[in-house]
Image (cartoon, rainbow, N blue to C red):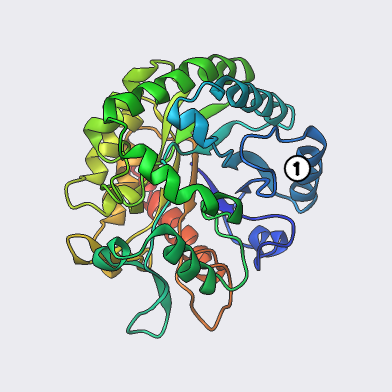
Amino acid sequence: MKMILRWFPDGDDSVTLNQIKQIPGVSGVATCLSKIPVGDVWPLDKLQALKKEINDAGLDLEVIESVNIHENIKKGFSDRDKYIKNYIETLSNLSKIGIKCLCYNFMPVIDWARSDLSYPLPDGSTAMAYNHDEVKNMNPEIMANVLSSESKGYSLPGWEPERLNDMAADIEYYKNMTHDEYWGNMKYFLDHVIPYAEKYDIKMAIHPDDPPWTLYGLPKVITSAQNIRTFLSLNSSSYNGITLCTGSLGSSYDNDIPAIIREFSGQGRIHFTHIRNLKHLSDQDFYESAHLSECGDLDMYEIVKAFHDTGFDSYVRPDHGRMIWGEEARPGYGLYDRAIGANYLLGLWEAIDKNQRGIE
């Protein structure tokens, strides 16, 4: 597997490329051009400058996370072909700087939801947390204000200011859309884009819904093994795959994460994985714990072993970390806890690999 870290450019990250380079076993970053409006083409010159900055720091750039999909594509509006054309042109530009994997999502309106970005833990650290009743009682505007007030001045992907004005109207629109209609809009997108992903050799890796249950009446589709099967059946190309996020899917007790990994990694359809742990406070309330198995409800050994046993050789990153040792950073994306998580995961992989090969 190839261990990378997510990093945000243009001064929008407290963590530097030089610091990432010093984490043992981390070879590159997943990044984005967050200032490009959704639906516009990502300019080649900006991508080339981004690649040079990362390569000059001694790191690889092979993963983008993410090129957001315009809401009109998700809604199936008549102008969606214009935005799909721009998406394909962006894929072309990404291929010219050597991108091999694109993590994206097809979540309607809201990419992710949390009720608290600095939930205090007993050890003195803080973490992102989700309380279902609190989130249900927030409308998107209130949630955006809560998240913004706790963001420490950093941007929050999925909660960009330009998206907020349309959120309430978009939510109302989706209340009249069936899940089958939404699946159809996903298939339309895939059938137009995947042939170009094949042409440009870029694996498309959709991210699960976070959390994986209905919220505000919005259609949620990448939520379970059965729904992943349905999604992958929309387009049979091996370039149509998933980003396996253990935290997003693991939020639901119904999801057996090692079994999901074994099924879809065994088919070669997991192109990227975000690995993190979480601790449930109830069926639909949780906080994002340290990566160590005993700190949460997910068995990191079984998760890593499932990837190893199925021959996974693609990209992995430690997902959201806690804020520890007094660090002030973008919630979930500090240096220290993610560095610990990366090396914990690498240690598990090395031990599993040597044990299976009989090396002492």
* Residue at image location 47% in from the left, 33% down from the top: 205
In this picture, residue 335 sits left or right of residue 228: right
Instruction: Pinpoint residue 13: horizontal percent, then vertical percent.
Output: 66, 63
- Amino acid under disc 1: Lys
Instruction: Pinpoint residue 222: horizontal percent, then vertical percent.
Output: 32, 37
The image quadrant that residue 173 belongs to is top left
In this picture, residue 82 sits left or right of residue 145: right
Under circle 1, the secondary element is helix
Instruction: Pinpoint residue 58: horizontal percent, then vertical percent.
Output: 74, 51
Closer to the camera in the image, 137 or 169: 169
In this picture, residue 190 sits left or right of residue 30: left
Instruction: Pinpoint residue 33: horizontal percent, then vertical percent.
Output: 68, 46
Which residue in the structure is indicated by mark 1? Answer: 51
Instruction: Tell me if I can see residue 16 in this picture.
Output: yes
* Residue at image location 81% in from the left, 43% down from the top: 49
The image quadrant that residue 224 belongs to is top left
Instruction: Tell me if I can see residue 355 in this picture.
Output: no
Closer to the camera in the image, 98 or 161: 161
* Residue at image location 79% in from the left, 41% down from the top: 46
Q: Residues within 10 Å of mark 1 (few under 14, many from 20)?
A: many
